[in-house]
Amino acid sequence: MKRWRAASLAAALALVLCACGGTGGHADGGSGGGEGELLVWVDNTRMPAAQQYKKDHPDLKMRIVTIPPDAGYVPTKISLANRTGDGWPDVVFLANPAEAATLAGRKFGYAAPLDALIPKSVRDGFTPGSLDTCTFGGRTYCLRNDISPTVLWYDTTLMRRYGYSVPTTWAAYQRTGLEAAKEHPGTIVGAVNGKYGAGVYFGSSGCPTRDTLSLTKVHIDLTRPECTRVADLLQPLAREKAVTTVVPIDPAFSKFGKDEKILMLPAPAWFGDFMFGPAFKVPKGRIAAAPMPTWPGENKPYAGQVGGGALLVSAHAGERTKDAADLVRWMTTDVNLQSEQPTYPAFAAAAKKWGEAKSKDPYYASDPMPALSAAANALRPGFGAVRFEADWQTSFNDTLVKAFDTGGNARAALRSWQDKLEAAARTSGYTAE
């Protein structure tokens, strides 16, 4: 298990920072099982777990193939298998959970519903809301391996140095950000770019940018208060450069950390391990986590989502379906396995055990688990997996981020974003409501 943890940590860090692919075999076709063979596609981080399952089931004929985490890779390969009528993996890991909507759709017909394959008692063990991105029209098409709820990360040293308090409301967050920008030029309290803006701020607010009603219907309405309040929050912060439009995974963002300019950063759970230290070079003993601030009129802080992974079973698995489902169940719910993985487990019992080590991690200024656990149990509903994930991100940058960069009107940009989202939805086979 220690070897699994070391390998998975190293692989996960490489994938996060470099978007590198696997180093094993490649998903280049081949029969989806041959004579009883279970064909499994996973990324480097999941490879040790799949190999362990194979070792523990010596009578099971199983072939494991390493795939890269690149967006679009799995759908492209599945499309090729659909055209040739051969080569479907019986189990596949998605580094981009939104692709479940593509693979479950009528055009692909790849993902098998799991409701009859995975007992309800097992599915009920997942963190509430974590399987929402796997569910379409009341049917569950995947199991989440890990989730990425957002929290308010902050630098305790800078907070003390400047005399600020950690905000519990978005109004206080805005005031603190504006004060910091004025009193300590260059200091930032957030980042708005692609999914790091749309998922963190609009997702936590409950703005229906991708509310999946079924595999063919999606609700989009950016005129709602849950959307306009986000635009009003970010507009003055962007004007004063208190939030940056530099994407956090861009190497240029690391300068904020090296120059001690990151006061706060609403961001996903995995930023704690994989961004603040390795990428932003913030020394240990400074970073802490707090719940996301509360929106006006609400008494509970909701979390957005940015990242995570999922496992699917092929509708073409045939006689291998039972074995495929058992592998997916084990990889996502085995407490000992999941507690050793690099990112926040979707299975609640595993998350609790995973948090035991996280609570003692000397990198953090204080135990981050209370905030992480609260966020995992407060995922904002309505954030679905959609087939226009890439357009969702680029259209956000083409409208809201452009407005922030040019001093444009954020509320007016919402109207443009709405138009682009509806067009993307229609192109992807949805009826936008």
Image (cartoon, rainbow, N blue to C red):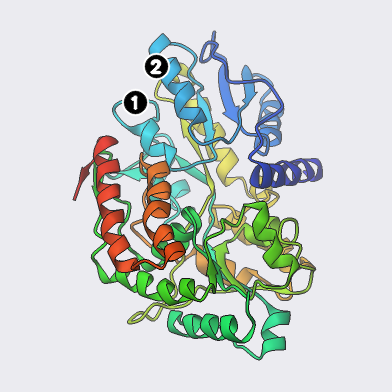
According to the picture, the residue beneath numbered tag 1 turns out to be 109
Q: Where is residue 176 shown, x and y percent of the image?
A: 54, 84
According to the picture, the residue beneath numbered tag 2 turns out to be 82
The residue at the point 58 percent across, 66 percent down is: 372
Q: Quadrant of the N terminus?
A: top right
- Residue 102 figure quarter: top left
In this orientation, does residue 386 appear? yes
Q: Where is residue 248 shown, x and y percent of the image?
A: 60, 57
Q: Where is residue 368 shown, x and y percent of the image?
A: 65, 70
User: Regarding mark 1 in the picture, which secondary structure is present there?
Assistant: loop
User: Regarding mark 2 in the picture, which secondary structure is present there?
Assistant: helix
- Indicate the amino acid at tag 2: Asn
Label 1 crowd (10 A; few <14 / some 14-19 / many >=20): some
Q: CA distance from mark 1 to mark 2?
A: 9 Å
Q: Residue furthest front?
A: 406
350 is higher (above) or lower (below) than 363: above
Is the C-beta separation of discs 1 and 2 under 8 Å? yes
